[in-house]
Image (spheres, helix red, strand yellow):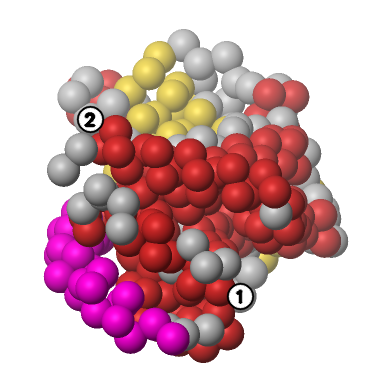
Amino acid sequence: MKLGRSWTLVRKELKEYRRHRFILSTLLIPPILLAILGPMGASLPLYLQDHAVDPHALATFPAPTTNLTLNASDAPSYLANHTSNGVIRLDHVALVGLSLAFVVLDNSTVTGSSLVQFTLNHSIVRGSNLTSGVVTSSLLYHSDLRKAVVQNCTGLGLNVSQTTIAGSPDLQVLMNDGTSSTGLASQLLQAYPLLMSVIPTVLPASIASYALVGEKTNRSLEPLLASPLSDRELLWGKVLGILLPTLGVTTLGFCLLALVSDLLTFGPFGYLVFPNAAWAIALLALSPLLAFMAITFSIVISARSTDVRSAQEVSSLLVLPIMLLFVGAILTSVLVNLLVLAVLAVGLLALDAVLFQLAVDLFQREKILVSWK
């Protein structure tokens, strides 16, 4: 097979798009609309909360001046020297990844630790578990509080259970289902690239279904099939002629998705959501593989059809199960896992290879010429 000869057919297909601007509009408009409207909808929870907290509170909060950092390796001897009557008393200390019980902390920072039966004053807590204690005039950030009393505090994304919150209007508590407004928006956005990867499966199917039946209606099928191109080269040319512009507008949609998402959420989140690994896998692997599958299916259907409408209807029926599978998986958050995404991409690659070979076997240009009326 010579790809150079297939490229001649690709150039012919691209010229057709320039003559028929509606084809490019069909490919271009939906990804752009989804890339703009999707992040706007996903970020709504960030702007509808009753007591929005400044995400930069960590920077503006008067952080304690810690004199010592304690972790699992160097903490035992220090804690033994600061224990009185079974209660650990610490001041101006940073705890990192420790599990402590019966502890009093003043002017300290706690990161990734677990505290049970505690008292916390004028301190900062990041991503920790606090059980059965009192928190006073402190900053809590993405932490777990159970059976605690919280007074005059500020914080973001707290998981609160059987806790009394007094005088803390700037405390953003998780929703009843355990998801904060920040977490909900983040989950929606993380799943959105997977939804975008379905778009290049749906959009080019109708165009691909026109690939050969359109040649029939234009009375150009006989010269095309009589060309020196092999069946494999002809199919490659048809597939690439539709796949390349599809991937172009898909890349534009993904870039626009990243831009709009980051503009809307950088303030509340304090970091850029995209690009990330899942976004890259969806753009560079899932989108082209799914698009290749849909286009190959549709071209085979187009070769066996006698009119454009029937080819488009059958192609839509074939693509619909793929779309429903992905949307269902996204809604259940099954696929938002890098290992699953990687395995899925490898599986799609193998499936595409088998599908293309099957398409070559089914093409049979002689039969197409004989059966065409």
The quadrant in which residue 302 appears is: bottom left
Residue 349 lies in the magenta-colored region: yes
Determine whether the residue tagged by mark 2 lies in a helix, strand or loop.
loop
Which label sits in the foreground, 2 or 1? 1
The residue indicated by pointer 2 is 72
Question: Depth check: 331 or 353 in front?
Answer: 353
Q: Magenta-highlighted stretch: main secondary structure?
A: helix
Crowding near pointer 1: few (<14 within 10 Å), some, many (20+)? few
Residue 231 lies in the magenta-colored region: no
Question: Depth check: 224 or 146 in front?
Answer: 224
Provide residue 329's location: percent of width, then percent of height. Answer: 40, 73
Determine whether the residue tagged by mark 1 lies in a helix, strand or loop.
loop
Q: CA distance from mark 2 to mark 1?
A: 34 Å
Q: Is residue 136 visible?
A: no
Provide residue 72's location: percent of width, then percent of height. Answer: 22, 30
Mark positioned earlier in the residue sequence (2 or 1): 2
Question: Depth check: 343 or 272 in front?
Answer: 343
Q: Is residue 326 above or below residue 259?
A: below
The quadrant in which residue 222 appears is: bottom left
Residue at 51% in and 88% down: 310
Give amino acid for label 2.
Ala
The residue indicated by pointer 1 is 176
Q: State which quarter of the image contains the C terminus.
A: bottom left
Q: Is residue 71 above or below residue 186?
A: above
Give amino acid for label 1.
Asn
Residue at 21% in and 53% down: 230
Provide residue 159's location: percent of width, then percent of height. Answer: 55, 61
Range covered by the magenta-colored residues: 346-373
